[in-house]
Amino acid sequence: MPELRLHQVKAMHQEHIAVNQVNLWLKAGEVGCLLGPSGCGKTTLLRTIAGLHALAEGEIQIDQQVVSSAKKMVPTEQREVGMVFQDYALYPHLNVEQNIAFGLHRHSRAQKEARVAQLLELVGLPAMAKRFPHQLSGGQQQRIALARALAPKPKILLMDEPFSGLDVELRESLAREVRGILKAEGMSALMVTHNQNEAFAMADSVGVLKEGRLLQWDTPYNLYHQPAHPFIADFIGQGSLITGSVCDCRAVHTELGLLKTQLPLGTQAGEAVSVLVRPDDILHDDRSDWKLEVVNRAFRGSHFLFTLKLPSGEKVMCMSQSHHDHPVGSKIGIKLEMDHAVVFTKEATLSQTL
Amino acid sequence: MSKTPKLWLWLSIVIALLMTTPIWVLVSFVFTPGNENWQHLLNTLLPEYVLNSIWLMLGVGFGTLLLGVSTAWLVTHYRFYGSRWLHWALLLPLAMPAYISAYTYTGLLEFEGPVQTAFRELTGQTTLGWFPEIRSIGGAILLFSLVLYPYVYLLSRSAFSASGHHALEVSRTLGVGPWKRFFYIALPMARPAIIAGVTLALMETLADFGAVQHFGVDTFTTGIYRTWSGLGDTHTAAQLSLVLLAFVALLIGVERWTRKQQRYFEQSTPSTETELTQLKGVRGWSLFAICFLPLLLGFLVPSAQLFYWSFTTADTQWNREFFELAWNSFSLALISALVVVGLAVILAYAKRLSRQKSVSRLVTVTHLGYAVPGTVLAIAVLIPLAWLDKVIDDFAYNHYEVSTGLIFSGTLFALVLAYSVRFMSVALQSVEAGLQRIKPNMDDSARTLGLASGTILRKVHLPLLQTSLLTALILVFVEVLKELPTTLILRPFNFDTLSIRAYEMAADERLADAGLPALLIVLTGLIPVILLSQLMDKKRA
């Protein structure tokens, strides 16, 4: 039973199209994440789902009921969605307890108290009930905002850049903690972020948005290993694209040799394509006879990241252990460890210059 | 280097003393016994002053609250006909001094005025007994509310638009309806700003002299003026001033306290993605009407009346004498602005360069002058200067047998000093805000690049401070131009300004002749209002 379903959703921001033709399906109890650079329309999409932004075309269903369509617009107040904002938007004139209880209208006093206590326990701040927002740290405020949104047991929780106001060190640990809380409540949630680490730490499914379009909606693993679009290959992880030519329907010929692949539909033998090479596809091996010139090196603490030049002049990246230092200009031995190459047509690549 | 901090300390001590001596002198009158005039006041008029002031404060507090908060809420949360230009146009009554507004409404609503005349012609009645008298305490409350609501509007508007949007949206997701959102979230969150705005409006109300004088509503300021000019009793005038200062101090206390609270209520970023609710048709037009009414009555109607008077009296009033008047006003305002801003720059630099707590405290003290009503300040400046003049005169007469006369209290010196005390805060705020943008690291980095401190001042500070200095100059200039009671009491013999002329014409029941000087004051007063609205548009963009 799907909890959130978007069908061909389009939303406008003043004159320009902010979100276009978005289809998405978040299952009950799942945590989804919309990932993309700033200005890609992810926040607008989230606000459209909450009913805070008008829908131009398409349809949004929550719990199998249409909440937004061309004909129907359920006001935010009646949607039963929880929302956590980037700035938390805690009510400064109410204490923690009153903030959390604010959405509990039809509850008796005792019920309210019980629910507030339960949530404070859940977010790990039971001693903070009487504090005011300005007396809390950023991380604490974030958790109280989460508790307030969860209190009325919404059908779905929406979070807009929930961790961006926090220290980098805190972000991932809190993201994991929040995921634990959502799973404990059995809550379906959709969040928006521009940070890949947060998305991967939080989400069961991640969607990558670019210029208002959802390019791929998939598991984090698949986004990295099977990106559907050159933009995703670039946005998630590192890598470079090299030229190859189609050999037959199962392989592509490149300067790195013949690579097994699943070719995009409609490609023909001999056609030039782009092949994604991740740094972890090429391993440094001093014993190898296959040597390439180092044109750049970056020390990353746990490893070196070398940029190597292929005979044609195209560049690939290679990771090596941190004690294998080689100067720029020297040649180092490599070996390939790639069982399945990701291939894009030249057209797709041109539309997305890496 | 060790000498510099001392120099700054001494400079700021001297200026702070100069700025605060009048107030200390006034306060010293607490310890002197009252004379028979004081006894008389205490038994007869003082209760009336207190009662009138309290009624005015209650009425104006309620009126500015109603007008300011409702208009601020509507323009920040809804889109309707005219909402974009009303956003800044609602500030326009700031350019209309209360006393000038009082003259125009008297002209419009008195027996011979156009409104009553029209009614009489329409109904055929010869007298309109039911027609309310504008020159009353009720009229004063209405009038003050109409010219002072922008203080509340300004502060609550920025409170509504700065922090409210996300909090209100969260309430929507929590299933809370619009009225509850306004009363439980928006209003409490804006409360400190609203209270601060109301206290500012009330301080202006208490400080007003021209409007209440014209309306015949006896308050402290009219009492002080009458005691001084009618009875010639400076001593009692000073004591009466102290009672008024106590009221003001109470308001300052409230304002300080709410500002402290405000820090916790201010939240991060204003939300840019929020789309305002569009209202069209009858609902859109009624919102327009609600927001347009204060602008119409607070600014447009009085301005129209002033224009009308100016045109009808142009042939007799538009003459050499008027230009002399304007010249007097503008040169006095310019000199005062230069002096005030000059002193403010010295104080601001003293605070910045010395980095001593004591200097910073002295600078803070000089801010207090803005709260002292003009009538009170005039008396406070007059007392020590008159004493000084007498000492000098006696000395000169005894030793050289010449009379030096009133070299301080009877010249522009007294006026400029009083303006400096009163408007130092306005100038300091601008200059300090400008200096804050020049980070200490900028000085340090310029120094590492080998620039001498004079060069740093010229090449780094001056370009960055330019706008703030100009703003400060304009603000003080306009304040001085509008000022009435201080000028009335302290001006040298036969020295007339635009505000004095408007006041005298109105006092002579020659309201139409007050039109031209008043119009010039209002038009000049528009400059800072336009600057202010531009500044805010920049912030919004």
Image (spheres, rainbow, N blue to C red):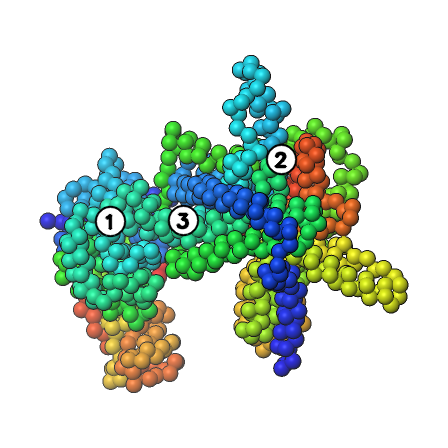
Mark 1 vs mark 3, CA separation in Å = 20 Å
| Residue pointed to by mark 3 | B160
Res B426 → quadrant: bottom right
The answer to whether any part of residue B445 appears in the image is no
Look at the numbered disc 3 and give the secondary structure of its residue.
helix
Q: Earlier in the sequence, mark 2 or mark 3?
A: 2
Q: Chain of mark 1?
A: B
The residue type indicated by label 2 comes to Tyr
Q: Is residue A342 above or below residue B90?
A: below
Q: Chain of mark 2?
A: B
Left or right position of A226 against B319: left
Left or right position of B128 against A295: right
Q: Is residue B537 above or below residue B369?
A: above
x, y percent for residue B499: 68, 43
Mark 2 vs mark 1, CA separation in Å = 52 Å
Disc 2 residue crowd, few under 14, some 14–19, many 20+, Cα 10 Å = many
Residue at position x 34%, y 79% in the image: A299
In front: label 2 or label 3: 2
Return the residue nearer the eye: A141 or A82: A141
Q: Earlier in the sequence, mark 2 or mark 1?
A: 2
Return the residue nearer the eye: B373 or B532: B373
Residue pushed farthest top?
Answer: B124
Look at the numbered disc 1 and give the secondary structure of its residue.
loop
The residue type indicated by label 3 comes to Phe
Residue B174: mark in rendering:
1
Disc 3 residue crowd, few under 14, some 14–19, many 20+, Cα 10 Å = many
Q: Is residue A152 above or below residue A246?
A: above
x, y percent for residue B119: 55, 20
